[in-house]
Amino acid sequence: MTPEQFRRHAHELVDWMADYLRDVGDYPVVPDVQPGRIRASLPPGPPRDGEPFDRIAADFRELIVPGMTHWNHPGWFGYFPANHSPPSILAEMLTATLGAQCMSWQTSPAATELEQVMMEWLRGMLGLPAEFTGVIQDTASTATLVALLTARDRAGAEPGRLTVYASAEAHSSIPKGARLAGFAPEHLRLVPVDETFAMDSSALGALMASDVALGLVPACVVATVGTTSSTAVDPLAEIGAVCRRHGAWLHVDAAYAGAAAILPERRALFDGVELADSFVFNPHKWLLTNFDCSAYFVRDVPALLRTFSAAPAYLRTAHDPEVSNFRDWGIQLGRRFRALKLWFVIRSYGVEGLRAMLRRHIVLAEEFRSWVDAEPGFVVPAPSPFGLVCLRHEPPALAGDGAATDEWNRALLARVNASGQVFLTHTQLDGRYTIRMAIGQWATEREQVARAWERIRHSAG
Amino acid sequence: MTPEQFRRHAHELVDWMADYLRDVGDYPVVPDVQPGRIRASLPPGPPRDGEPFDRIAADFRELIVPGMTHWNHPGWFGYFPANHSPPSILAEMLTATLGAQCMSWQTSPAATELEQVMMEWLRGMLGLPAEFTGVIQDTASTATLVALLTARDRAGAEPGRLTVYASAEAHSSIPKGARLAGFAPEHLRLVPVDETFAMDSSALGALMASDVALGLVPACVVATVGTTSSTAVDPLAEIGAVCRRHGAWLHVDAAYAGAAAILPERRALFDGVELADSFVFNPHKWLLTNFDCSAYFVRDVPALLRTFSAAPAYLRTAHDPEVSNFRDWGIQLGRRFRALKLWFVIRSYGVEGLRAMLRRHIVLAEEFRSWVDAEPGFVVPAPSPFGLVCLRHEPPALAGDGAATDEWNRALLARVNASGQVFLTHTQLDGRYTIRMAIGQWATEREQVARAWERIRHSAG
């Protein structure tokens, strides 16, 4: 395909892309397909000779798009949002065209320096400590693993004596990361939570003291601001004090909720972050930036580099002593030019534009919650400080029968989602099946939130 | 930015993108910038209010592009190639527009099933065993870490007793991965290489037998097809036999050279791959697919899932028993829709089109090598079975003075690269500074190869 053929096809695709952004709300959020059907529609082997692009593009529209779940549908209320935005997509087009490999300063000076500047912008926007230095990781799972590995190596004791702490509500990437990092499974302490599903810092202190008394070495605590199940907020200041007492690394997982730190009125939920050793949040969730883009901030850069740097002859450059080579700041050697989309997004919307979007979502969540609170038979089992509202329907006829109530809510959620106009997901809170309504897709308006509530109420009736 | 504003800006960018693909050869391959200059040209903080996109696009062209290293320049001979291609860029545009999160089948059915089909296409194209199942990882570094972690967990002995083996020429991601996976540093065996820089399988057998005699447990051998320094080929069949004898996991790192397995005439270099437990190669290197896209094949899928699966309530779906949820096949939970670009690339070029490109590069490398071989004072210290040719200039005046010869070649390379028209990098072979000429950028023609050789010869004169 020549550059001129590319030009023609790309212009055609741009029109499809703009139409898609305009019309995505007309698709069913989740497709009605059975496992294996799309696979069966594709040839089992590759073509011998090249095919015309028009045929490939037609197959994309006819075979692939109808089988996609539309994460950027305005009726998206599942999991957490995975926002893109028009300026972010524009940046991704350029990133793909440059095709640069941003492993070292020399292999992409502008990408490295723009990443440094964007991480500084974000650090300031979130009010994170000036001692933090940022680097882009692909996902929060990876960033948390990076923190656990750094903490493991920094602890300076044999791995069999190290302990790790997180609340029972922490994300699955924390037990998974601890396992991958080689911590003994029996040394991962799941700290109990209080009635708001936040970590009980006294319980943490007691566990840690008892571990130390046994000769174990507390290596890392992972605290969460905005847990996945209910957006609970672990008390960072109290947890940080416990960590300081015993020399444990404090990693803060704010994958979803970290974006809200740009709101002065939500900043108090992050009090104590100045005691953290590392912090991660995902601009690719609630800050209009295409996946993948996870912002990882760390205090002790030399510790990070001790764990992750590798400088074989073929990677050394003349500039190494005076630059940051981000290949040494994480697991991967190769890196995409991900700072560009952050630059396009932050400049296109400005800090006030991003704040306005977050506030709009939070107000919608508060309004939704008020509707649920006012409706007999519905329960909201957790605080909702951000864009997520958890709910359960508890019909009087099933009172006292937890299993039947769980089954009822599972069926209720299936009925709501079957409409194809909205999509919500579930979790467990206190061992009970709970419906999650996550408001945060960039194009979501009051109309879709009201429609979701109507469907829930109607399906429960 | 509305969809209609997006449409206008995207059309404008497409014209820039097509121009860039046409004109990239006119840029200096590596920019002439000093560290910190780009950073200093950017504001230290974010704008309060949004800015017009035209201004952002202008800054991209004026501040960022002049500071980029152009990996897709036809004069690119550094590291290994990091190819994109027009069809791959078109796919990335669509991937960014869908913005789908492909962690589970339900969260993107078409993406999951297309990934399965693409991995089957690639498995067949490379002639890999039918028992291998493929999954896309981001990079070979990550894939190798995945293999090491799976091997560690499958070995079933305490971590302190496990050993890992790789040749002294293995990529830096192997010692780094072994360290991250928690293998004891003193239990990573760097196996000696023969005169072709390939692993000495007898030495491997002797090391492993002696470790077993000491009560240690061989967990994993990483063999390389196409090492980074010189594209040496470890003897897979002999290494596989040693692994089978002692129950060690055999991981094959073919990050760069794996693409060449689609050539029947190069297939013999992969003999013995049928004994491997896992295999990785990067379509994002030499198969026209934008970074990131690393194809990881594994024999024992249940072992992989035992190490990487995590299924908290909020991630469970009704389809889990009957589908593959790729979130359980690696480190990251979130995943981009990366199969789409493979589909676009393989269909656009066809298997024969891809073979033709690889053969063109290999023929150019053979021709380049013949020029170097014929030139007095130049040495080619390693075989060149793929697209990489290593070379050194050894002026008679410096004969016997290794350090001075190293310095001479370092200066020679700097003079060659200073032209801005070509870019080569270096390595160490046998402890000696060695220039690497990696031919594999998709637009590279004989003209650029000849120009590079002219510059080298002229700069050495």
Image: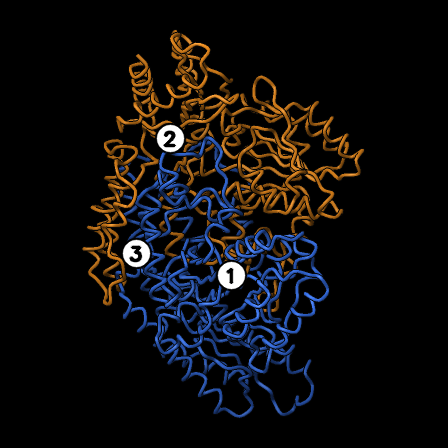
Chain colours: A blue, B orange
Mark number, residue B107:
1
Judge from the rendering whether residue A362 lies leftward or rightward of residue B243; answer left or right: left
Separation of residues labelled 1 and 3 (CA atoms): 28 Å
Q: Quadrant of residue A344?
A: bottom left
Label 1 CA crowd tier, 10 Å (few <14, some 14–19, many 20+): many
How far apart are labels 2 and 1 at the CA level? Answer: 35 Å
Mark positioned earlier in the residue sequence (2 or 1): 1
Which structural element holds mark 3?
helix
Q: Residues within 10 Å of mark 3 (few under 14, many from 20)?
A: many
The amino acid at mark 2 is Gln
Badge 3 sits on which subunit? A
Quote the CA–CA distance across marks 2 and 3.
29 Å
The front one of A54 and A404 is A404
Q: Which residue is mark 3?
A: A343
For residue B441, which numbered disc appears in the image? 2
Which residue occupies the foreground of this view, B5 or A303?
A303
The chain letter for the residue carrying disc 1 is B
Residue at 56% x, 38% y is: B280
Identify the secondary structure beneath mark 1: loop
Q: Residues within 10 Å of mark 2 (few under 14, many from 20)?
A: many
Check if mark 1 and mark 3 are on a common chain. Answer: no
Q: Quadrant of the C terminus of chain A?
A: bottom right
Give the image location of residue B14, x and y in percent: 26, 47
> Which is more foreground, mark 2 or mark 1?
2
Chain assignment, label 2: B
x then y, percent, for residue A240: 52, 69
- Name the mark nearer the viewer: 2 or 3: 3
